[in-house]
Image (cartoon, helix red, strand yellow):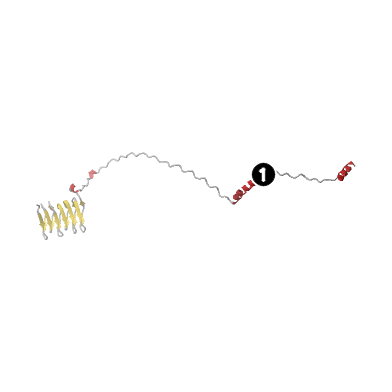
């Protein structure tokens, strides 16, 4: 069973702190802290240096980098100026952080490491042949319907109305017999008149 150490409130440690097991800090540490177990900083704790352990839980103030093999948790009221590095990082509401965050460590926790810059190599672009698509011809447009006949004006209507009457009159004339003028009527002369004429001729 791992041992747990405590730095009580009102205690100030000048120098680095390292050891096996867990550590709880309630006072002030001016140096780095390196433990094999958990490291917990209370609200009154102040650490001026880097902190490393399996799980680091911070409620107080830290001026340094935090490195956890399992997790780094910043609780409400935490004040951290430094970088965070752990497979799992949590920042609660009300915690302040000024630094970078890196989630790297054990791959069993489902954390994928970022590839290095050398892993990104440009590949030659090879154009793939594209199948030629022939354009489809649109079907011919249907022929437009013939234009409607122009509307009949009054003169056209009169002519059209008169055409049946002319045809009827021509048919009637064809059926009627040809009329001839009557022979001239000559006046008849009496017998005395004829004789008078003859006598006049003889004289």
Judging by the rendered image, the residue that carries numbered circle 1 is: 175
Give the number of marks.
1
In depth, the one of 87 and 28 nearer the eye is: 87
Residue occupying the point 64% across, 46% down: 168
10 left or right of 143 in image: left
The extreme bottom residue here reads 10
Determine if residue 16 is in view.
no
The residue tagged with tag 1: helix, strand or loop?
helix
x, y percentage for residue 194? Answer: 86, 44
The extreme right residue here reads 203
Q: Is residue 126 above or below residue 101?
A: above
x, y percentage for residue 151? Answer: 56, 50
Q: Is residue 79 above or below residue 149?
A: below
The quadrant holding residue 44 is bottom left
In depth, the one of 73 and 173 nearer the eye is: 173
Give the quadrant of the C terminus: top right
In depth, the one of 103 and 140 nearer the eye is: 140
98 left or right of 196 in image: left
x, y percentage for residue 32? Answer: 13, 53
Determine if residue 195 is in view.
yes
x, y percentage for residue 159? Answer: 61, 49
Number of other residues with Cα within 10 Å of mark 1, as a class: few under 14, some 14 to 19, many 20 or more: few
Residue occupying the point 62% across, 47% down: 164
188 left or right of 51 in image: right
The quadrant holding residue 200 is top right
């Amino acid at each position: 069973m791992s041992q747990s150490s405590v730095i009580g409130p009102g205690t100030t440690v000048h120098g680095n702190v390292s050891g096996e097991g867990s550590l709880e800090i309630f006072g002030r540490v001016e140096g780095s802290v390196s433990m094999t177990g958990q490291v917990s900083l209370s609200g009154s704790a102040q650490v001026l240096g880097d902190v490393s352990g399996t799980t680091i839980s911070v409620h107080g103030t830290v001026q340094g980098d935090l490195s956890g093999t399992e997790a780094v948790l910043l609780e409400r009221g935490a004040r951290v100026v430094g970088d965070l590095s752990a497979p799992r990082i949590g920042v609660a509401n009300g915690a302040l952080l000024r630094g970078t965050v890196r989630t790297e460590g054990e791959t069993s926790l489902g954390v994928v490491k970022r590839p290095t810059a050398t892993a990104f190599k440009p590949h030659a672009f090879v154009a793939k042949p594209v199948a030629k698509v022939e354009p489809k011809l649109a079907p011919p447009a249907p022929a437009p319907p013939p234009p409607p006949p122009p509307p009949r004006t009054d003169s056209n209507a009169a002519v059209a109305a008169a055409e049946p009457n002319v045809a009827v009159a021509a048919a009637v004339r064809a059926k009627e017999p040809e009329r001839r003028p009557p022979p001239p009527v000559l006046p008849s002369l009496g017998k005395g008149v004829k004789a008078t004429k003859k006598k006049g001729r003889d004289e």
